Amino acid sequence: MRPVSIRQWSPWGLLLCLLCSSCLGSPSPTTAPEKMAGSQGLRFRLAGFPRKPFEGRVEIQRAGEWGTICDDDFTLQAAHVLCRELGFTEATGWTHSAKYGPGTGRIWLDNLSCSGTEQSVSECASRGWGNSDCTHDEDAGVICKDQRLPGFSDSNVIEVEQHLQVEEVRLRPAVGRGRRPLPVTEGLVEVRLPDGWSQVCDNGWSAQNSHVVCGMLGFPGEKRVNTAFYRLLAQRQQHSFGLHGVACVGTEAHLSLCSLEFYRANDTTRCPGGAPAVVSCVPGPLYAVSSDQKKQQQSKPQGETRVRLKGGAHPGEGRVEVLKASTWGTVCDRKWDLQAASVVCRELGFGSAREALSGARMGQGMGAIHLSEVQCSGQEPSLWKCPHKNITAEDCSHSQDAGVRCNLPYTGVETKIRLSGGRSPHEGRVEVQIGGLGPLRWGLICGDDWGTLEAMVVCRQLGLGYANHGLQETWYWDSGNTTEVVMSGVRCTGSELSLDQCAHHGTHVACKRTGTRFTAGVICSETASDLLLHSALVQETAYIEDRPLHMLYCAAEENCLARSARSANWPYGHRRLLRFSSQIHNLGRADFRPKAGRHSWVWHECHGHYHSMDIFTHYDILTPNGTKVAEGHKASFCLEDTECQEDVSKRYECANFGEQGITVGCWDLYRHDIDCQWIDITDVKPGNYILQVVINPNFEVAESDFTNNAMKCNCKYDGHRIWVHNCHIGVWARATQRDQGGRKRPSFTHSLPPTLVLCPPTCLCISQPLSFSPPFPTMGLLPHLTRLFTSQVTPSVKRPTGSLSATLARPATRSSEALPPSSANHHWPLRAGV
């Protein structure tokens, strides 16, 4: 309904209008959202590419003119309303920043605000029709559920010949029947049109066209095909051509972006003298199935990986990180587009980019930001070959980290596994399909030794993201008609794409606990935490202390000393401890929470705190060949947010029996001067060693990435002094020993600049950067020595660390943390070292 002009009113009507606040024509302040008139005469459509029939850029026709909607203040509730206008039941998501390409014409709506229950978008509040300060780079899109409203009559049918577009592409094998290995890498190119699948005429077909098709299908490259064989084969078959004149440059992320023509319905002669286009693609290393493909991948020169993806819930997606000067850093999202994202995807062995992500959609990174304003043509073999700007500290922040979602080959692995009995599609008992050449049947997995790593593979295979829990007992979930256990002894590293790639007992099933109640189950989640240790801080704060035995009773109770301490002459003598601080960041997309709830935490009277995790970190001293000569461990004495990024608020604090955890964007600091923050090296002989720290070593809590949970430093110990240098985060290795739980322990690559630890011939040895002079901070040394050797047990709490010399000069403070629930009005012993 159009606004009523004041000039249309009679004097009496105008007077009545002024006295009545409900006047239809009364103007409203320009700052308040406007309730729009009814939707009569409005038409809606989905446009843009690449897209499927139920998604796209939203366009509205009003007064005969098509326009778009700005993404400012756009929400899922607005998407629900628009999807119903388009004839779908609901929305599953929405997009911003013109994901489906910028529109043209007017921008009809801005600051659209809906509750989700409106019958029409015109009932939602906005700035008014045509009132917008946006550009078409901010056009909003919706992703609707592929389910139509019953009885919906679509009056918004657009002329088909004017708006045909390629929505999906596939390769259909021209020869062979029956079960074929997936993914399909060679075959006839077919496109999905409104009337079904059609072939593409190969007249003028080029290698650039094949490159684009392979990229859409998840393959990084293409190879030549035997055209003569396929043309001979085509003479014996009937074909339905729907597309011709395809001319791609080779840098397009989708076939719709190429120049092409559709055959009209009345075209009687199609593809004269031609045949169906045939493409042969080269799969990436993860998807090579045949021996020839694997040999081809192995024959390629394997240089050092300088690009990786982190934080993605699915293969082929994540935050882009690049390696520069032996340090991993992120990429700023300025000018980040599909061409640059496609270069990253192909470099990593995937297809072209499905989406270029901005605004740290895959979580914020840590450390350096190496690249900004990356501008690729799409033909570069590596992101480093693209023109870019070297970033400075003030140019960009980690809230602008770039990410990608890549096209992946269809492997069909999700059809070989399923979840049953759960309360939602994201949880349940795991059932696998077996049968080989015989009849296919479903069976269960033995729960023995089933853990987080195996659950991660299941969730990845099903496309459900990460694993929250790997369950060994599932008696509370109904197994239905499936009762046979068909797989046992499953052991995964966590990086596999399917359970088929994990080790297991094969056809022989050996299960210690029989029955359906002891079968494997999972709970999946789209987000997970990701812990990372600040390795430079370990290097800067490491030192040796000779601590008297009479100050170590609580530590002995916590089992934080070497075995030889049990036979020591207590309380006389001392233990030599390698101390250091550890600062653990959560870079994931979900908070890190203990696996056990508060009801099962164990109260430790000696230190005066609760343990929410018995082993939170492992500390080891290894020989260069990997033999362990000293070890330590740290329980989760207090998981809390010590400090956070500027825009993040603390959520977890241990005081007064509070909730424990580490919020996304925060870090937990364990200072070097608290109990058990050490390795007992009393029995270690002089020599060259490796200091190893592993967070969450038993995989008790699920994370998005376990490969960055470990750190190693090189150490040189002469019996009096120790040098700690080259501290670096590592990645899990495949050819390494397993720990007591049967899990593989980490190996490491890439290093940070070394720091030398220089000390006087005393019992203390403190690491300092090489640029410090003198190397040992003498300020505050005497009070610290006095406190260490003459004082009684002094409670110490976790607190932010300043300069090391200032840390030594400060006395430890007291804190009341983690008191029992019944202690609200009582004074309890304070913990001496957290």
Image (cartoon, rainbow, N blue to C red):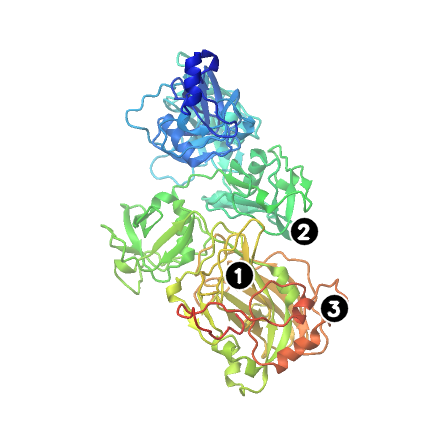
> For the residues marked 2 and 3, what is the alpha-carbon distance in whole angstroms?
26 Å
- For marks 2 and 1 on the same chain, the one whose residue lies earlier in the sequence: 2
Q: Which mark is residue 746?
A: 1
> For the residues marked 2 and 1, what is the alpha-carbon distance in whole angstroms?
23 Å
Q: Amino acid at mark 1?
A: Pro
Residue 13 location, quadrant? top left
Q: Which residue is mark 3?
A: 775
Q: Which residue is mark 2?
A: 325
Q: Where 29 sits versus 303, above or below?
A: above
Q: Residue furthest left?
A: 481
**Front label number (2 vs 3):** 3
* Front one among 239 and 390: 390
Mark 3–mark 1 CB contact (< 8 Å): no
- For marks 3 and 1 on the same chain, the one whose residue lies earlier in the sequence: 1
Q: Where 441 sits versus 827, above or below?
A: above
Q: Give how far across and how far down residue 202 sits, in percent.
A: 48, 22
* Front one among 502 and 235: 502
Q: Amino acid at mark 2?
A: Ala
Residue 675 location, quadrant? bottom right
Q: Residues within 10 Å of mark 1 (few under 14, many from 20)?
A: many
Residue 306, visible in the rendered structure: yes
* Front one among 736 and 664: 664
